[in-house]
Image (cartoon, grey):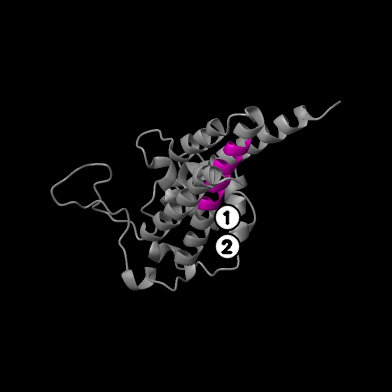
């Protein structure tokens, strides 16, 4: 392994992983994008080992996430079912005065009412479950970046710069801001599993197509 190789894709993976872990720790519980709805879906599956029945017009803690593909939630439930999360409603105390997505002079942007003592380390209950799932999300995001690099290697074996360049794009790509993909890898979000699965399938297909008949 040359030094240039290590300073390319390896540093991209290390930076992505470390920054993802940092974001997963410093963002308060339920303040991440849609975590208010994603985690209750995980908890329901962990408690019942069944999918919720979506009834039109009936509001639930997981809202529309109950109709989403369940694989990510099943993984999260499998990792956290052993934790007593009976305190979810207390931790997930919705802020009735939040100005979500609206810039106002009072700066009331917290989605939930936080209790610093309950959320402090060492984590326990719902807070512990959320952080475990966040770490899983970071791992999924890191794996997607790695598989992107391997796809680039397989497609362009003589151009390593294209492989690590593709990994960098995967790591820093965004829909609305330069950090959205990285940040969302640090919290429960079913979208974290999709890039990993797509990259794995493409890499597997490319490897199979390279085998002699």
| Rendering coords of residue 110 (x, y %) | 28, 54
Write the residue at 84% across / 27% down: 212
- Residue 93 in the figure: left or right of residue 203: left
| Rendering coords of residue 137 (x, y %) | 52, 51
| Disc 1 target residue | 76
Tell me which segment is drawn in magenta: 137-150
- Residue 206 in the figure: left or right of residue 181: right
Q: Confirm or deny contact between disc 2 and disc 1 (CB under 8 A).
A: yes
Question: How far is the residue under mark 2 from the one under mark 1?
Answer: 6 Å
- Relative to residue 41, is residue 197 depicted above or below? above
- Relative to residue 51, is residue 121 depicted above or below? below
Question: Is residue 106 visible in this depiction of the protein?
Answer: yes
Mark 2 Cα shell of 10 Å, populated few (<14), some (14-19), many (≥20) = many
Number of marks in the rendered image: 2
Q: What element carries label 2?
A: helix
Question: Is residue 61 visible in this depiction of the protein?
Answer: no
Work out which residue is located at the far front of the displayed protein and give it. Answer: 2
- Residue 178 in the figure: left or right of residue 54: left
Residue 80's disc is 2
* Pick the front one: 86 or 25: 25
| Rendering coords of residue 126 (x, y %) | 47, 65
- Residue 45 in the figure: left or right of residue 208: left
Work out which residue is located at the far left of the displayed protein and give it. Answer: 105
């Amino acid at each position: 392994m040359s030094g240039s190789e290590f300073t390319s894709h390896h540093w991209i993976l290390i930076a992505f992983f470390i920054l993802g872990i940092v974001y997963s720790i410093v963002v308060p519980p339920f303040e991440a994008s849609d975590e208010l709805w994603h985690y209750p879906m995980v908890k329901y599956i962990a408690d019942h080992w069944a999918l919720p029945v979506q009834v039109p017009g009936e509001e639930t803690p997981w809202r529309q996430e109950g109709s989403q593909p369940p694989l990510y939630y099943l993984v999260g439930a499998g990792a956290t079912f052993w934790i007593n999360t009976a305190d979810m409603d207390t931790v997930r105390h919705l802020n009735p005065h939040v100005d979500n997505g609206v810039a106002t002079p009072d700066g009331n942007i917290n989605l939930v009412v936080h209790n610093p003592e309950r959320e402090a380390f060492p984590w326990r209950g719902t807070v512990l479950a959320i952080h475990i799932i966040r770490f899983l999300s970071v791992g999924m995001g890191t794996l997607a970046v790695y598989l992107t690099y391997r796809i680039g290697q397989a497609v362009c074996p003589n151009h390593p710069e294209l492989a690590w360049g593709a990994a960098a794009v995967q790591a820093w790509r965004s829909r609305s801001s330069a950090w959205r993909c990285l940040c969302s890898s640090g919290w429960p979000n079913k979208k974290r599993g999709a890039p990993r699965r797509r990259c794995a399938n493409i890499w597997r297909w490319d490897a199979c197509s390279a085998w002699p008949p």
